Amino acid sequence: MTATTEPTAVVTGTIRYWAAAKAEAGIAEEPYQAASLAEALAQARARHAERPTFVRLLGICSYLVDSEPVGGRDHATVALIEGGTVEVLPPFAGG
């Protein structure tokens, strides 16, 4: 489960991209080294700066951190754990 206090420890894990996010990133997954979801996403944006559609898409995606929905929480307060997984779920039609 993710914490809701200010994350401090940098950990490693995996970001997994689904559907349109995967297509726009050009990869299915990649590693992160970050303390918070906000940091991990900032790294992804920087790594894929040459893919502006992907960078914009990250702004409207839903996220699961270790199978828990992030919802409307501030991404800077969502702590990541060692070996964790961030799932990037773009909006999609049909429910």
Image (cartoon, helix red, strand yellow):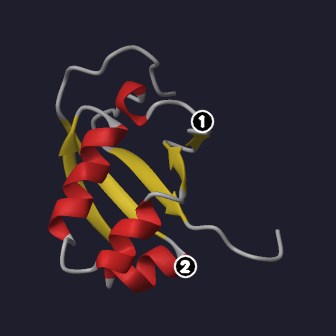
- SS for dot 2: helix
Viewport quadrant of the C terminus? bottom right
Question: Badge 2: few (under 14), some or many (20 or more) residues near its Cα, within 10 Å?
Answer: few
Compared to residue 40, the image places residue 6 above or below, namely above
Q: Where is residue 90 in the image (x, y as percent from the top left)?
A: 57, 67
The residue drawn where x is 42% and y is 51% is 86
Real-space CA distance between mark 2 and mark 1, rounded to the nearest whole angstrom: 21 Å
The residue drawn where x is 17% and y is 31% is 10
Q: Which of the two labelled residues, at mark 2 and mark 1, occupies the earlier sequence position?
A: 2
Q: Which of 36 and 11 is in front in this view?
A: 36
Q: Which residue is identified by label 2?
A: 19
- SS for dot 1: loop
Total numbered labels: 2
Q: Position of residue 63 (x, y in %)?
A: 53, 50
Q: Which residue is identified by label 1?
A: 72
Compared to residue 25, the image places residue 1 above or below, namely above
Numbered label attached to residue 45? none
The residue drawn where x is 33% and y is 32% is 81
* Comparing labels 2 and 1, the label whose residue is closer to the camera: 1
What's the residue type where badge 2 is placed? Answer: Ala
Q: Position of residue 32 (x, y in %)?
A: 22, 52
